[in-house]
Image (tube, helix red, strand yellow):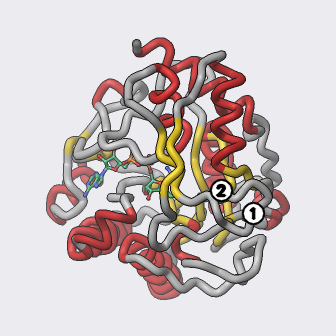
């Protein structure tokens, strides 16, 4: 595991060693490859706050794009061929048509999405020129927790809806802000496609097998194709926890599309991947089991 611990937690590293290295440190990354000789790489490291990227784009291009280039160069230098990359639905921007398939044009509307799209483009060139075998998995909204409740979401600041709703229910923050109640959706709140982290992990394992079978490259959405509104999430958190979720309706946030839902058929077909835990109640139950242990 390579991580600079800017956002990550050492206690979450359960299996194998941790190299505390920043991807922007080119020599440091090369040394990790020299020391640990990985067979393949799964590349999660990134800054991922859309709002921050609109304030400080340079941080996103340096960390996410240049950092990834250092990583790709280390793969090439050490003859490592396979890489699975955490991409995002933010590479699509604000498409007019739903669901979003991999053919939907990628027009990011913030530096975060752009920084990730640039990595996808680098992967294609490194694949063509250096023979890297790669998969870019475009996550929609990741949710849930380890089903054994050992590892859960611990972001600071937290920006994800389910943790924020649970905190509000637990009284750890005053109330949950509902950004926009006048969207053209059935209940007026924004709709997103949530995917359980457990199912996401399974997709990564399948993607590694896919690459090692020389079946790549692969660009695939990871979502379920089922959207849930902010209100539905709040109601589910209330039902699962048995607690009230205090919320406050506020204005829409700039750049928040009404609906982002994946067409995830490519991942299901190419990887034989079937989400098992990504129904909304299970995601909230698993998140709740973890959060309850923290208090
Ligand atoms: N969580 C989601 O809903 C979601 C959706 C789409 C894409 N993604 C992508 O999935 C990946 C993981 O997301 P997450 O929600 O777990 O975020 P996270 O912030 O919890 O994890 C990112 C990790 O990368 C590390 N990191 C950041 N910059 C680094 C650097 N320069 N060098 C070394 N380590 C560095 C952080 O310390 C952290 O442990 C990210 O690439 C993110 O863009 C997440």
Q: Residue at x 59, y 64 (%)?
A: 138
Q: Is residue 289 visible?
A: yes
Identify the secondary structure beneath mark 1.
loop
Residue 236: image location, x then y, percent = 70, 32
Residue carrying label 1: 185
Residue carrying label 2: 189
Identify the secondary structure beneath mark 2.
loop
Q: Residue at x 60, y 34 (%)?
A: 144
Q: Residue at x 16, y 61 (%)?
A: 25
Residue 72 vs residue 246, the one in the foreground: 246
Residue 23: image location, x then y, percent = 24, 59
Residue 139: image location, x then y, percent = 59, 58
- Circles 1 and 2, Cβ within 8 Å, touching? The answer is yes
Residue 44: image location, x then y, percent = 43, 53
Q: Is residue 77 visible?
A: no
Relative to residue 257, is residue 44 drawn left or right? left
User: On the image, which quarter does residue 199 sit in?
Assistant: top right
* Quadrant of the rendering where the N terminus is positioned: top left
Relative to residue 126, is residue 136 drawn left or right? right
Q: Residue at x 64, y 48 (%)?
A: 230
């Amino acid at each position: 595991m390579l991580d600079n611990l800017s956002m990550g937690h050492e206690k979450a590293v359960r299996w194998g060693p941790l190299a505390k290295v920043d991807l922007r440190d080119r020599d440091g990354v090369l040394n990790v490859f020299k020391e640990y000789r990985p067979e393949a790489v799964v590349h999660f490291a990134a800054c991922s706050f859309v709002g921050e990227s609109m304030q400080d784009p340079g941080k996103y291009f340096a960390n996410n794009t240049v950092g990834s280039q250092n990583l790709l160069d280390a793969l090439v230098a050490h003859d490592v061929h396979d890489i699975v990359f955490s991409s995002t639905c933010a590479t699509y921007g604000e498409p007019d048509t739903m669901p979003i398939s991999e053919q939907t044009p990628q027009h990011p509307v913030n530096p975060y999405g752009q920084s990730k799209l640039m990595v996808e483009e680098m992967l294609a060139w490194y694949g063509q020129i250096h023979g890297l075998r790669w998969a870019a998995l475009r996550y929609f909204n990741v949710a849930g927790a380890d089903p054994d409740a050992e590892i859960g979401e611990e972001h600071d600041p937290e920006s994800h809806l389910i943790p924020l709703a649970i905190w509000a229910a637990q009284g750890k923050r005053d109330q949950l802000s509902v950004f926009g109640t006048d969207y053209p959706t059935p209940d007026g709140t924004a709709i997103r496609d949530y995917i359980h982290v457990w199912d996401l992990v399974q997709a990564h394992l399948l993607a590694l097998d896919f690459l090692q079978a020389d079946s790549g490259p692969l660009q695939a959405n990871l979502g379920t194709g089922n959207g849930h509104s902010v209100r539905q999430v709040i109601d589910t958190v209330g039902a699962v926890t048995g607690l009230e979720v205090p919320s406050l309706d506020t204005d829409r946030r700039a750049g928040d599309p009404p609906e982002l839902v994946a067409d995830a058929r490519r991942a299901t077909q190419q990887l034989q991947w079937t989400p098992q835990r990504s129904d909304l109640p299970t995601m909230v139950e698993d998140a709740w089991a973890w959060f309850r242990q923290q208090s």
